[in-house]
Image (spheres, coloured by chain):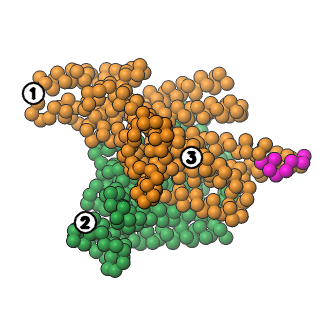
């Protein structure tokens, strides 16, 4: 019951956030590139639902466009993690207890020694700030998360009888990994992917907040917060709403992840081993 | 145990070595040399050459790498390209803010998370549990810099209990320093406490389901006694790992929160280094943070192995 509720609330919040991003390509209530200083700091109400910022831009419209940035950065970063991490993990599991396995796992530990924010800072120092570099930084951090997860899950699968029969029938480690192990990991990957997605949204917001993420004029929730920091005392709506957008999105993704996990495997309900990889970029 | 520690030490040294190579290589591919950047476009060639000589930039890269690493081992982090002061002193000045801040936040997070996690686990399914789970779900979703901004507006601007930012320095007294770090520490602690409370709860729930707890109850201990004498100690193992991880994340995570509060900590130093192309500062601070992360992980591993001999073999 509780898990269903998580799933429903999570899916609802994620849908709203996704829809806002999609609709923003076609329509926003106001043009976000249009500056109208005379109209600045309008409080929430009519005609600006969530008010306007220090340049007179409509905050609701900016949040819609900002959702695009969040989704794009987090989605690509999670994809990088899955595309590189899962094959590495499967490969390590197929060659378990060999030198190559050891090297892959120690390599993962090495990446974990660099908190994502540090990777982002180094990349920024070299290539300059930008959305692309934020993606790479968050993506690199995601690789060991997925590598560890898929290795651990694959290791236990390798002990199972159906894998043994596949080996007896002469399939190579590679074929077993692709045909038998991977399909059994999909649920797990979906759950972890959702959680990493939420961390990606938080990370993107944090990086943009300190100016290492998306650069103007690309709207981003984190930068909206950074720009409005000084106006908080007299126009609190410019700070409240972008923050709420981040909170609701991350909350939605986390609830969706928890809900999916319970849905796929009710036994996992109370332990949450995945959470151990929670990084805090922010 | 000694063999275990030796093996872990070896892997620690190797990790640090590789990390230092990566950091050096990553930051050395940056185009343009610091000496020309510092002196500007109109600089005379011989001035640039003299500065390069002074900064030790005119030797081959492998030599520079060796100089950097051996320098750090002896506590000499080089000279800042921008300020011409020893990087070591700059880092030391900032460390006295960032390090206590991370510790303070960790302390707060633990003080909140332990009771919350224990109550949630012992009152499973009750209102207390549901409210802890709900609050922590929210706590994980709140970006700490946003929370920091809200804290500032509430406690610094409206109520004026704390100053909105800056740091008076420890010379102003321990109390004044702690006061300046309180809001940043709360902002940092919130998400960490949420994660920790959830880990505490689930770990305790697992332990409470174990046979030895049933045995303890069967021999006549009350639920409370079984919890305090048996369950809690065993539940602490995963919790300790998370605390170890959190300390390093707090050191790095402070980078963003320091910006909100204008605290002159390591985070601000790193940003300054980037904007001023002061690469030696960036390299050294990144290396230092990586060292902190690796060191804490190592200590947690050792602490575990000391407590639980089964873990010595597994690694």
Who's the residue at 33% across and 32% down the image? B281
Instruction: From the image, state whether disc 3 or disc 1 is nearer to you.
Output: 3
- The chain letter under disc 3 is B
Q: Which residues are magenta?
A: B219-227
The image quadrant of residue A185 is bottom right
Residue holding disc 2: A55
Who's the residue at 54% across and 34% down the image? B296
Q: Alpha-carbon distance for marks 3 and 1?
A: 55 Å
Q: Find residue B129 and report its horizontal and vertical position in percent.
A: 68, 60
Residue placed furthest toward the bottom? A46
Task: Give the colour chain A carries in the figure.
Answer: green
A266 vs A235, left or right, is: right
- The chain letter under disc 2 is A
Instruction: From the image, state whether disc 3 or disc 2 is nearer to you.
Output: 3
Numbered badge on residue B44 = 1
The residue lying toward the viewer, choosing from A93 and B37, is: B37
- The chain letter under disc 1 is B
Residue holding disc 3: B108
Residue A74 visible in the displayed image: no
Residue B238 visible in the displayed image: yes
Q: Alpha-carbon distance for marks 2 and 1?
A: 44 Å
Q: Find residue A65 and report its horizontal and vertical position in percent.
A: 33, 67
Q: Find residue B182 and report its horizontal and vertical position in percent.
A: 49, 47
The residue lying toward the viewer, choosing from B40 and B15, is: B40
| Disc 2, SS | loop
Q: Find residue B135 and report its horizontal and vertical position in percent.
A: 58, 60
Instruction: From the image, state whether disc 2 or disc 1 is nearer to you.
Output: 2
Badge 3 or badge 1: first in the primary sequence: 1
| Disc 1, SS | loop
Chain identifier matching the orange colour in the rendered picture: B
């Amino acid at each position: 019951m509780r898990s269903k509720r998580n799933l429903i609330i999570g899916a609802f919040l994620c849908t709203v956030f996704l829809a806002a991003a999609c609709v923003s390509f076609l329509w926003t209530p106001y043009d976000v590139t249009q500056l109208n200083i005379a109209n600045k700091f309008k409080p929430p109400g009519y005609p600006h639902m969530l008010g306007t910022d220090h340049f007179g831009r409509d905050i609701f419209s900016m949040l819609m466009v900002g959702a695009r940035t969040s989704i794009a950065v987090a989605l690509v970063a999670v994809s990088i993690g899955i595309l590189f991490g899962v094959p590495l993990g499967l490969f390590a599991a197929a060659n378990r207890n060999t030198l190559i396995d050891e090297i892959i796992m120690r390599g993962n530990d090495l990446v974990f020694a660099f908190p994502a924010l540090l990777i982002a800072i180094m990349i920024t120092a070299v290539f300059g700030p930008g959305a692309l570099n934020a993606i790479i930084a968050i993506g690199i951090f995601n690789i060991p998360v997925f590598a560890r997860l898929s290795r651990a899950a694959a290791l236990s699968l390798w002990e199972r009888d159906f894998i043994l029969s596949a080996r007896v029938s002469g399939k190579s480690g590679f074929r077993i990994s692709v045909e038998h192990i991977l399909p059994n990991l999909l649920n797990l990957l979906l759950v972890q992917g959702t959680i990493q997605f939420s961390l990606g949204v938080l990370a993107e917001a944090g990086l943009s907040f300190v100016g290492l993420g998306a650069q103007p004029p690309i709207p981003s929730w984190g930068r909206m917060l950074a720009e409005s920091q000084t106006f908080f005392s007299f126009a609190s709506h410019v700070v409240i709403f972008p923050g709420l957008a981040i909170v609701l999105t991350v909350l939605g993704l986390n609830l969706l992840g928890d809900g999916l996990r319970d849905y796929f495997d009710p036994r996992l309900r109370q332990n949450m081993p995945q959470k151990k990889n929670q990084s805090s970029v922010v | 145990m000694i063999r275990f520690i030796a093996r872990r030490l070896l892997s620690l040294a190797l990790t640090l070595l590789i990390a230092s190579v990566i950091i050096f290589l990553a930051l050395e591919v940056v185009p343009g040399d610091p000496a020309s950047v510092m002196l500007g476009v109109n600089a005379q060639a011989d001035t640039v050459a003299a500065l390069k000589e002074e900064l030790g930039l005119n030797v081959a890269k492998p030599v520079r790498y060796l100089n950097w690493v051996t320098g750090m081992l002896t506590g000499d982090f080089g000279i800042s390209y921008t300020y011409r002061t020893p990087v070591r002193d700059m880092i030391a000045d900032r460390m006295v803010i960032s390090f206590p801040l991370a510790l303070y936040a960790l302390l707060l997070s633990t003080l909140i998370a332990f009771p919350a996690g224990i109550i949630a686990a012992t009152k499973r399914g009750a209102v207390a549990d549901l409210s802890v789970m709900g609050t922590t779900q929210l706590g994980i979703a709140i970006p700490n810099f946003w929370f920091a901004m809200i804290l500032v507006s509430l406690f610094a601007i409206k109520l004026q209990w704390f100053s909105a930012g800056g740091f008076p320095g420890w010379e102003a007294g321990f109390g004044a320093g702690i006061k300046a770090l309180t809001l940043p520490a709360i902002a940092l602690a919130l998400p960490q406490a949420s994660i920790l409370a959830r880990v505490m709860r689930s770990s305790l729930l697992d332990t409470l389901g174990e046979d030895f707890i049933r045995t303890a109850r069967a021999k006549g201990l009350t639920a409370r006694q079984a919890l305090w004498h048996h369950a809690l100690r065993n539940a602490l193992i995963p919790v300790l790992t998370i605390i170890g991880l959190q300390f390093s994340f707090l050191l790095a995570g402070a980078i963003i929160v320091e910006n909100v509060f204008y605290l002159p900590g390591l985070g601000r130093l790193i940003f300054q280094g980037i904007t001023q192309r002061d690469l030696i500062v960036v390299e050294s601070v990144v290396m230092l943070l990586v060292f902190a992360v690796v060191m804490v992980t190592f200590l947690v591993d050792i602490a575990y192995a000391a407590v639980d001999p089964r873990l010595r073999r597994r690694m």
